[in-house]
Amino acid sequence: MNPCLVCKTPVETFVSFGPQPIANGFIAEKDLGREYFFEMEVAFCPECKMAQLVRQPDREQMFHENYPFFSSLSKGMVEHFRKFSETLLTKHIRSAAPFVVEMGSNDGIMLRNFQEKGIRHLGVEPSGNVAEAARAKGVDTWTEFFDEKVAEKIVAERGQADAFFTSNVFCHIPYTHSILKGIDKLLKPDGIVAFEDPYLGEIVANTTYDQVYDEHVFFFSLHSVSYLFGRHGFELFDVEPQETHGGSMRYYLARKGARPVSERVRATLAQEKELGLDRIETFRKFAKNVEASRDAFVALLRKLKSEGKRVVGYAATSKSTTILNYGKIGPELIEYICDTTPLKQGKVSPGMHIPVVPHERFAADRPDYAVLFAYNHRKEILAKEKAYAGEWITYVPNVHTFANG
Ligand code: SAH
Ligand code: TMP
Ligand code: ZN
């Protein structure tokens, strides 16, 4: 049995996805044969209630100068982070001249809102290319992996912060205690932490097993977040469910006793107990649902193929890597995947090697079916694809087809 990454208690593996490549490892045809694979398994800790990956590739294999995920490509997410910044500034940050720090600031999608208001800020972003895109917008960014040492350096050079926030990053980082010690050093006594990540409750409820990939080492719930931060003197004082990334949770934390704990925290903790997010049995059942979902998806693709239908993928998401490799779905079932990211185009998908093509190709050739891999951007995509008369395929919350409109 493996020790829990958070509390060292032996964990129980409840689902295995077999060998998986780097989820964002879109690869040029000439580099085929040099791909890295790891055995992907998820386990549950009975003590701190953290669902977690059993093993994970080295961080430099995932986050580097060719990181292909640019946050600002989604208009919906740009708006989401504009609102998030407003919420922080109007409801939570008390200082009149605050200093804010973001971990994993990517291309500046969030910090841009602070920069434009002349607010002191710093982004810590290890992937060189996206960090550069942020700097080009005037967002102050260090190209580093945030940890305790970097926190000390920030305090030495810029002073302590009023707020530390991070979205879709915390769940990527196995060395949580170094992050927490860093936050503790970085934050002023009445400073706050706000972060959001895909929510375990949604993953279980919707069988969105594609949230499991190399970068997502933790699947947080209020139970596990309270435990982890509690060990470092922090308290969860509010939560807000989000629609982003297929269902996320935003957590607000401060030092114990510093802020009143909202009723929503107590209510959501009780709800988690009802859903069984604190018990291994729930995850054993989830594993069965995962297998059933995969089988239904593969069966549908094979049926369409036998009927001579043309099926393509819409958006080469990191999530799609899990679905495709777990179901062993290659170009024989999905002809290509269209995507708006130039860095992904002209390459093939990790592991199963489905060609990734520009969106224009999809717009031009009108296939019979399109698999909506970016279901987290469903509204935005369906709104702009009204002209597409073919059917859509989704596997959320179960495998089915639908027409737009
Ligand atoms: N916050 C953005 C980007 C999320 S993608 C959004 O929500 O859209 C995850 C980002 O985390 C990547 O840009 C990656 O380079 C960064 N990252 C990974 N490990 C990190 C670490 N230790 N410190 C800071 N950023 C990290
Ligand atoms: P995400 O699911 O991790 O946010 O990644 C989104 C991916 O989907 C990214 O590669 C860009 C792509 N995409 C499109 O191709 N078209 C779109 O309309 C949207 C919103 C995203
Ligand atoms: Zn644990």
Image (cartoon, rainbow, N blue to C red):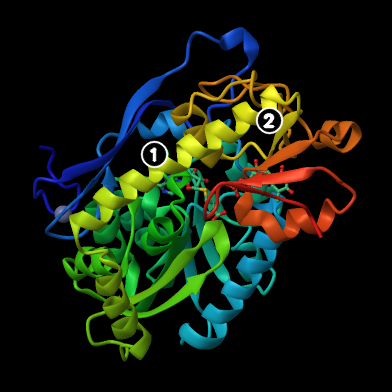
Position of 308 with respect to 347 (left or right) is right
Q: Quadrant of residue 196?
A: bottom left
Q: Position of residue 17 (x, y in %)?
A: 36, 32
Give me the residue at 77% from left, 52% from top. 403
Q: Earlier in the sequence, mark 2 or mark 1?
A: 1
Q: In the rendered view, would you say 329 is above or below 197? A: above
Disc number for residue 249: none
Position of 188 with respect to 97 (left or right) is left
Give me the residue at 51% from left, 21% from top. 351
- Look at the image and tell me whether residue 96 can be seen: yes
Disc number for residue 291: 1
Whether label 2 touches label 1, CB < 8 Å: no
The residue nearer to you, when weighing 39 against 185, is 39
- Residue under circle 2? 304
**Secondary element type, mark 1:** helix
Q: Position of residue 12 (x, y in %)?
A: 16, 44
How many tags in the picture? 2
**Secondary element type, mark 2:** helix
Q: Quadrant of residue 60?
A: top left
Disc 2 residue crowd, few under 14, some 14–19, many 20+, Cα 10 Å: some
Q: Identify residue type, mark 2.
A: Leu
The residue nearer to you, when weighing 293 against 387, is 293
Q: Position of residue 356 (x, y in %)?
A: 70, 27
Q: Position of residue 67 (x, y in %)?
A: 56, 35
Q: In the rendered view, would you say 176 is above or below 263? A: above
CA separation, marks 2 and 1? 20 Å
